[in-house]
Amino acid sequence: MHPGSPDLTKTLGLSVLVSALLPGAAMALDWQIEPAIGATTILTDNATQTKNGDGAFIVTVTPGIAVKSKGSRRVQASLDYGLSATERIGGGGTSDSDDLNHRLNATGKAEVAEDLLFIEGSANITQALTSLLGAPGDSSLDTGNRSTVGTYSLSPFLTKRFGTFGDGVLRFTQSGAIFEQNTGGDIASSALLANFTSGSRFNDLLWGLNYSLRDASTDGRQDTQFESYGATLGYALTRKFRLRGSFGYDNNDYPATAGTKTDGEYWTAGFDWSPSRRTSLEASFGKRYYGDNYALKFRHKMNRSVWHLQYDEGASDIEQQIRNTANLYAWQCTEGIFLHFSNVFPPEGRTECVLLAVLPPNSIALGTDQGISINKTLRGGMTWTERRITWSIDLFDTTRAYQELAGLPEDRTRGFQAGFNYKAAPHTSINALLGLTNNQVDGSLIAASNRDDDIYTLSVGVTHQFQPDLNGSLVFRHQQRESSDSAQEFSENSLSATVTMRF
């Protein structure tokens, strides 16, 4: 059994340390504490998701705990932790196998000095894909294509209002990523952010000055530095529509192939439109040192639906990519549908909330990490509820161009996921999911021919609430890969039963 690396245990400990460092830890706070235990059994005909894989019977037991602070405006903290023990009988062809995996999502924020000094912290542990070209199954299967990764962040910051003239923010962040089994080089980074924006004195004219600096050290790689400084200018034509632009300079230092620029002037032009409190649209275009640059962010909420679409571009390392592709969860509450980062606690201030769907992140493959890359990411979707039926559709498309390699080779992940939920009875729901993911990898990244894979997923299941704190589900899933390399094709069918109890 593999209990996880010592470094990841440190990451788990860091989440506790972050909570202790928050000044509110010493205050008389109310805490919502929910211990839980879950058990899942899986019967699969291809436990390794390979061309000639064997069947297996899999049992996973996950004790966990969810903790959330209550009753304080100045301190908010939450922790969701689970430890999954998995035992596989068969599937490896010659022997059984087992694993022990941590899962953690911890966040905290405290107001140290009123309206002046704040501190934020977070720690996360998950099992991430090692390679886009490996098996896509989760950590319960014996695919060998999942690796435990931990991220952490501690960030004190100052905010100050200078009357009606403007507002200033000064933030320092210490963060990093820790990878198990050498699937990536551990990263430690320090970042400084400073900006000043105009106040109400300037009426419809908006302006700002900004500066950022990030230094990162990666095991086995050259240190990197990202520095940017510039100014923004905007004008509100109406209360709902504003023009804006920016200009400045990116002064970066990171390894790149000969002839590839790493710094230079930048400019953007765009607009912000908010026709109502439920709808917002931000769009811009411009130039940066790596070429044309575009950005888009759209949100629309209705009583029964939520719509979102976002596109952005930029240079980043694997730590930043992991942070930028976290799951979003759709919650159905009395007040409507809301997107939230937690799958344990509903959005703050909402009532009678039920978790509807997980909006999938872009697949980030650790094994194809080749240092700094220029990323272009599109992500969008909608969730719609009508009486007993909820529909969801999510789209994603990410391209990474690796700056250290000759020819700037790329990999690309794109696809969609469509979900369906039917509330057949007050405590029973029927669920279905259909998904397609296309992975394309340049041959120079894998020392082989170009790869082009299509992965199809179909699942149908039923969930039932036996008691207020006891839930169960039964799910059938089919997964299949078609590949330009026929030796990598597979199909898998599985039936899983899960029971979860909260105390």
Image (cartoon, rainbow, N blue to C red):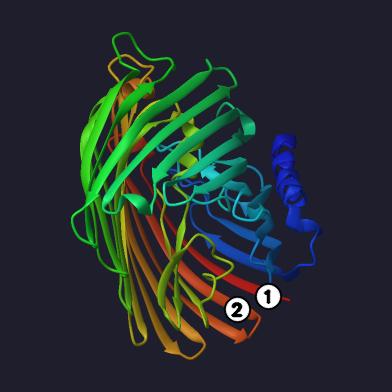
Q: Is residue 209 above or below residue 447?
A: below
Mark 2 and mark 1: Cα distance apart in space: 7 Å
| Image-quadrant location for residue 34 | bottom right
Q: Residue at x 57, y 17 (%)?
A: 220
- Residue 45 image point, x, y percent: 49, 56
The count of marks equals 2
Q: Residue at x 46, y 31 (%)?
A: 212
Say what amino acid the circle numbered 2 marks.
Asn
- For the residue pair 26 and 336, the one nearer the viewer reads as 26
Q: Is residue 122 above or below residue 474?
A: above
Say what amino acid the circle numbered 1 marks.
Met
- Residue 121 image point, x, y percent: 64, 47
Q: Residue furthest top?
A: 258
Q: Is residue 304 above or below residue 91?
A: below
The residue indicated by pointer 1 is: 501
Q: Residue furthest bottom?
A: 426
- For the residue pair 33 and 203, the one nearer the viewer reads as 203
Q: Residues within 10 Å of mark 2 (few under 14, many from 20)?
A: some
Q: Residues within 10 Å of mark 1 (few under 14, many from 20)?
A: some
Position of the C terminus by quadrant: bottom right
Q: Secondary structure at mark 2?
A: strand
The residue indicated by pointer 2 is: 471
Residue 274: tell me if it is visible: yes
